[in-house]
Amino acid sequence: MTQATLKQLSQQLAAKQVSSVELASQYLDRIEALNPQLNAVVSVDRDKTLAEARAADARLAVGSAHPLTGVPLLHKDLFCQEGWKTSCGSKMLDNFVSPYSAHVVEQCAAAGMVTLGRANMDEFAMGSSNENSFYGAVKNPWDLNAIPGGSSGGSAAAVAARLAPVATATDTGGSIRQPASHCGVTGIKPTYGVVSRYGMVAFASSLDQGGPIAQTAEDCALMLNVMAGFDARDSTSLERAREDYTRDLNQSLAGLKVGLPREYFAAGLDADVARAVDNAVSELKKLGAEAVEISLPNTELSIPAYYVIAPAEASTNLSRYDGVRYGHRAKDYKDLVEMYEKTRAEGFGDEVKRRILVGSYVLSHGYYDAYYIKAQKIRRLIANDFKTAFTQCDVILGPVAPTAAFDLGQLSSDPVEMYLSDIYTLSVNLAGLPGMSVPAGFAANGRPIGLQIIGNYFAEAKMLNVAHQFQQATDWHAKAPAL
């Protein structure tokens, strides 16, 4: 049962082949058995979960159910959820139980979905390896010596290990797509503003965007139907008519133009990754697509631009964690200033401190124009590159990361090298575009490789169509790690 997709579970629940309580119990048992070696889940409350499952079964019994009623899921531990600890993988919020729920959590609850628990993550979503969590590193279920990717590594590892059929996640610079790629699952980051950020603890407000991680593109489409929608409480939420993201899944790819950016296939791309992407392009050609070479000339500038803008926004957002109102507070201090200093020194991990310092520096007097304003100008150039590219193609294809998952600890002492692993994902967030990762093969060492699909603004249904058709023709998404 735990190997089934979201769509299959929905059908089984509707047909009364299984109850929500039975389903939730199976997943909770699997989490209990496997999570000690994976560390993908940080909070579980069996009583709460089974109470939600019983309520879902009651809805199913009277015929008032949503298509996903009774289906269990994990929430990334930065979506506030009433009555659950919302830690953001940080000591700073280790004692914070949220008094309210995020819009995404509310939407899932309204659909009757059942919370299994909370997924581990890099502290305040800052990281590409999920080694920055206060609760310890998450392990990749395909190889316990490998990183799962970050910051949504707990969500991706849990779905890959079948600890949950789906998990919510967030993407600030690739944090849905990169762990989905490294763990051999499917993940989508929608257009900025499509999913409300209300109740989603902020890292970089102009870049953060929520989305789902699941086994298949079809599952992601079903989840996006639940997660997306206008929310007046979020000033960046877009007021648009609701979409059915499953509507184009079965459309033919005949005549589709896929753009291949020459900058994505230059030096630095691992041969195994290049081969997997090439094979995926060949598969899409068999389905009727046409490949065209395009250029995204400012791709290499996405790393310096991102690592000015994101830390700047982070330094502002994280200034609220001062020990006064909620969260961790130092025990011993002489005055208010020392309380601030000790609280933040004790509460934040090294990577968070590093980004706060960088952000404060680039926003300081004398450096704001030289760094922050210049980075914003580069951001516009990157968006313009995509605008030009989409006059030549319908979607853009390429790698998600330069390599398959690297070893735990391999880059932890070299943050710059770690940042370089985000080269293919950052520009999508800087431009506010939708992007996704779908399983496309394995490296020689047996670690998964993902194919990145990038769409124009609000082209999620088209991207999901491409991904679904690719998954109908391949079985990479159906493979599961042996645990």
Image (cartoon, grey):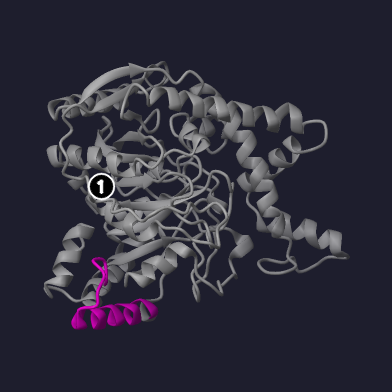
Q: Is residue 303 left or right of residue 145?
A: right
Number of marks in picture: 1
- Residue at 34% x, 82% y is 51
Task: Give the residue furthest to the right.
Answer: 335
Q: Is residue 64 left or right of residue 302?
A: left
Taking the magenta stretch, the answer to whether it contains residue 106 is: no
- Residue at 19% x, 26% y is 255
| Residue 265 seen by the camera | yes
- Depicted 428 relative to depicted 61: above or below: above
- The residue pinned by badge 1 equals 217
- Depicted 140 relative to depicted 364: above or below: below
| Quarter of the figure that contains the C terminus | bottom left
Rendered image quadrant of residue 354: top right
Name the chief secondary structure element in magenta. Answer: helix
Estimate how packed mark 1 is, as few (under 14), some (14 to 19) or many (20 or more) residues with alpha carbons within 10 Å.
many
- Residue at 69% x, 47% y is 315
Q: Which residues are magenta?
A: 48-69
Taking the magenta stretch, the answer to whether it contains residue 53 is: yes
Image x and y of residue 191, in percent: 43, 44
- Depicted 420 relative to depicted 348: above or below: above
- Identify which residue, 375 or 150, lies in the foreground: 375
| Quarter of the figure that contains the N terminus | bottom left
| Residue 143 seen by the camera | no
- Residue at 48% x, 35% y is 410
Q: Mark 1: which amino acid?
A: Ala
- For label 1, the SS is helix
Q: Is residue 3 left or right of residue 150?
A: left
Rendered image quadrant of residue 471: top left
Image x and y of residue 192, in percent: 48, 45
- Identify which residue, 324 or 37, lies in the foreground: 324
- Identify which residue, 429 or 351, lies in the foreground: 429
Image x and y of residue 464, in percent: 27, 43
